[in-house]
Structure formats: C-alpha cells, structure tokens
Image (cartoon, helix red, strand yellow):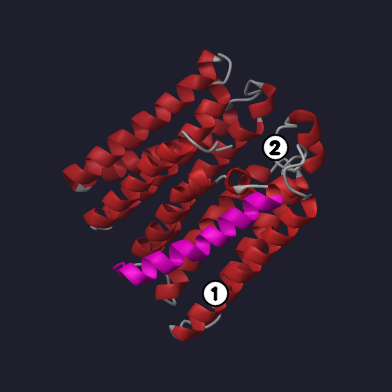
Amino acid sequence: MNWQTLLRLGRVSNLPTVWSNSLAGLVLAGSGVMLDVGLALMVIMSLFYVGGMYLNDAFDQHIDAVERPERPIPSGQISATAVYTSGFIMLALGIAALFWWGQSMDRGIAPGLCGIALAGAIVYYDWRHKTDPVGPAWMGLCRVLVYLAAAFLVTAQPPVILYLGAVALFCYLIGLTYIAKQENLGRVANLWPLLFLAVPAAAAVWIGATDGIFALALAIVFVVWMINALRYLWRRQPGDIPRAVVSLIAGMSLLDAVLIAHMGAPQMAAAAAVCFVLTLAFQRFIPGT
C-alpha cells in the first residue's frame, strides 16, 4: 500500500467539488464566508467524501473483482477490512465534528443531525447503488446534505434560495450519476434521465440573464461545459462515457459558482470556479471515477 493507492481509493481528484459545495452552502444560507469557517467546513466535508469513496470500493469489491480487477482491493494493494475501517472512522469523525461545531457556535444539534443523515445516505448509496433504481437520487441527496449542513452551521432557518439551489444541485447529480452507472456498459441505455440536467441549466440561464456580467459569464461557461460533456454520449467512441462523467463532475463547481454569483459574492464565486479548474487538474493525475 502506498499514497497513490490511498488517493485512488478516495478519488481525491474530485475533492474540490466538495469544497465548492461547502462554499455554496454557506453563501446561499446568507453568510459571508470567513476564512477559518470555510476551511474548517471543507476539511469536515472532505472526511465525508473520502470516507464515502473508501466505502464505495469496499462494498463493490466483489463486482470490481470481475469488472475492474485493477482497483486497489481486488488487486491486493489494500485489504477490504482496512478500507471499511478507514471509511467508517472518517464518517464518524465528520459527524462528531459537526456536532461539536454546532454546539460551539450555538447552532444546536442541527448540523450534527445533517451529518448523521449525510453518513446514512452515503452508506446506503455505497451499499445499494448497483441494484437500487433510484440510486442517483441518493447520490444527489448526499450533495444536498452538504449544502444543508453548511447552512445550519450559520443559521437556524436557511432561506428559500438555499433550497432552490439544492434542487438544482440535486437534479444535476441525478443526471450525472445515471450516466456514471452506465460507465462499464460503454453506452447510455436511456437518455430520459438526462432531462434532469435541464433544471440546473435553466437556473444558470435565468441567473445569467438577471444578475450582471460576471454571473452571465459563469452561466455561459457552465452551460457550454455541460453541453460539451454530453456531446461525448452521442459520439460514443471508446472512453467517451468516462470523459463525460469526469467532465460533469468538475462542472459541479461551475454550478456552485453560478449560484454563489447570484448571491452577490463574486470573490466566493471565483473561488468556486477555481475549484472547477483544480478538479480538472487533479483528474489528470488521479482518476475521477
């Protein structure tokens, strides 16, 4: 076992999308993001993400032994027991941190309860995503709960805009995860679930049309990037579905940036856009799927 194995297990190239989700949750809740709060939340949510990715490989070890024998567990680079243990410890640390932080900031137990819900959604998705037809919705719920946990750390009553942003993110994840489920088939069997992607696209168009030049620029980049990613599904050359998946994963940070721009926080929107660039850069060295 080496660092490369651990990084592949955690699919850490996609971590910047978790960081931009954290920023978006704070800003959509109406909070100005202080550096210490933003960084601490990114660390906590990174624990949930990496722990969830570890458990994903642990639960999929027998399927991977057939379909992807090069993955760390079936190839013998690390034991399933070590991966299970590490994954659950990271989830437990994330939950404990949210409970402690909620109490220390006088926000009660709501952040911690969001952490429990997030861990539960992660474990259920990892356990049943191969057989549950609504598995993509569970993945969407995981990202929505990042928004909610962030929001309840700064307010007892998140505003409506946070929930509207969460709906856009939820729909984006349904479309993205459905495509990812077809990765080993080499084709997307049904295209209708991709209609969910129209929701975040429409939200971006509306924001771009109403919120000034910076929001417009971000909205254009997001929509064009999403269309370019979907183009791979129609081209259907070898490796096109994985390309579409990793492109859409990175695009999640662009959606966060658009939503943040709507809140009049250009610096935080720019930070989310940087997360998009970081994801693409990291994916060049560590596989995103």
Task: Identify the amino acid type marked 1.
Answer: Ala
Q: Determine whether 154 is above or below 72 in the image.
A: below
Residue at position x 68%, y 47% in the image: 1
Examine the residues drawn in magenta and state their main secondary structure.
helix
Residue at position x 42%, y 37% in the image: 280
Whether residue 196 can be seen here: yes
SS type, badge 2: loop
Horizontal side of 267 relative to 177 (left or right) equals left
The quadrant in which residue 136 appears is top right
Residue toward you, 212 or 68: 68
Q: Which residues are magenta?
A: 32-55
Q: Is residue 212 magenta?
A: no
Q: Earlier in the sequence, mark 1 or mark 2?
A: 2
Residue toward you, 213 or 85: 85
- C-alpha gap between disc 1 and disc 2: 30 Å
Residue toward you, 186 or 61: 61
Residue toward you, 40 or 267: 40
* Image quarter (top left, top right, bottom left or bottom right) of the C terminus: top right
Residue that label 2 marks: 71
Please provide percent x and percent y for residue 230. 48, 25
Please provide percent x and percent y for residue 203. 37, 43
Q: Determine whether 107 is above or below 45 in the image.
A: below
Q: Determine whether 146 is above or below 197 in the image.
A: below
Q: Is residue 53 magenta?
A: yes
Residue at position x 58%, y 43% in the image: 4
Residue that label 1 marks: 97
Mark 1, other Cα within 10 Å: few <14 / some 14–19 / many ≥20: many
Please provide percent x and percent y for residue 39. 39, 65
